[in-house]
Image (spheres, rainbow, N blue to C red):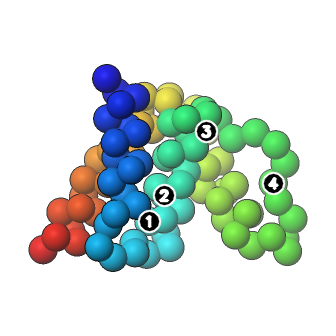
């Protein structure tokens, strides 16, 4: 099922041989949250919380994307990273 494939990709991404760049990590985070929880909720973190604010903003850019779309994009990105890092 889509959910099983999504969970499998989430597990595989933790075993990548190299750490992806921060912008890619934010994209993974946002797609994962959108796939699991849907649209972002709550208030944007304060200016002092740089990491929290970056995560919130990345997730907020996906507003309106369906869970299924986010899951498929997440799995595709994980596949790209796996092939990129295996070269």
Determine which of the numbered discs, if any, sits on residue 44 in the image: 4
Determine which of the numbered discs, if any, sits on residue 27 in the image: 2
For the residues labelled 4 and 2, the Cα–Cα distance comes to: 17 Å
Identify which residue is drawn at 40% across, 39% down: 7
Q: Earlier in the sequence, mark 4 or mark 3?
A: 4
In the rendered view, tell whether residue 47 sits above or below residue 68: below
Query: Which residue in the protein does label 1 denote?
Result: 24
For the residues labelled 2 and 3, the Cα–Cα distance comes to: 13 Å
Extreme residue toward the top, this view? 1
- Position of residue 42 measured from the top left corner of the image (x, y, whole percent): 82, 43
Specify few, some or many for label 1: CA neighbours under 10 Å numbering under 14, 14-19, or 20 or more: few
- Position of residue 30 measured from the top left corner of the image (x, y, whole percent): 55, 51
Which element type, helix, strand or loop, lies under badge 2? helix
Identify which residue is drawn at 49% across, 69% down: 23
Determine which of the numbered discs, if any, sits on residue 63 in the image: 3
Specify few, some or many for label 3: CA neighbours under 10 Å numbering under 14, 14-19, or 20 or more: few
Specify few, some or many for label 4: CA neighbours under 10 Å numbering under 14, 14-19, or 20 or more: some
- Position of residue 20 measured from the top left corner of the image (x, y, whole percent): 39, 72
């Amino acid at each position: 099922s889509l959910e099983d494939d999504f969970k499998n990709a989430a597990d595989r991404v933790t075993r990548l041989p190299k750490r992806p760049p921060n912008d890619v990590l934010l994209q993974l985070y946002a797609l994962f949250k959108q796939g699991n929880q849907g649209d972002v909720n709550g208030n944007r973190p304060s200016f002092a919380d740089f990491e929290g604010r970056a995560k919130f903003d990345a997730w907020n850019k996906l507003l309106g994307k369906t869970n299924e779309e986010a899951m498929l994009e997440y799995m595709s990105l994980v596949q790209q990273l796996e092939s990129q890092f295996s070269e």
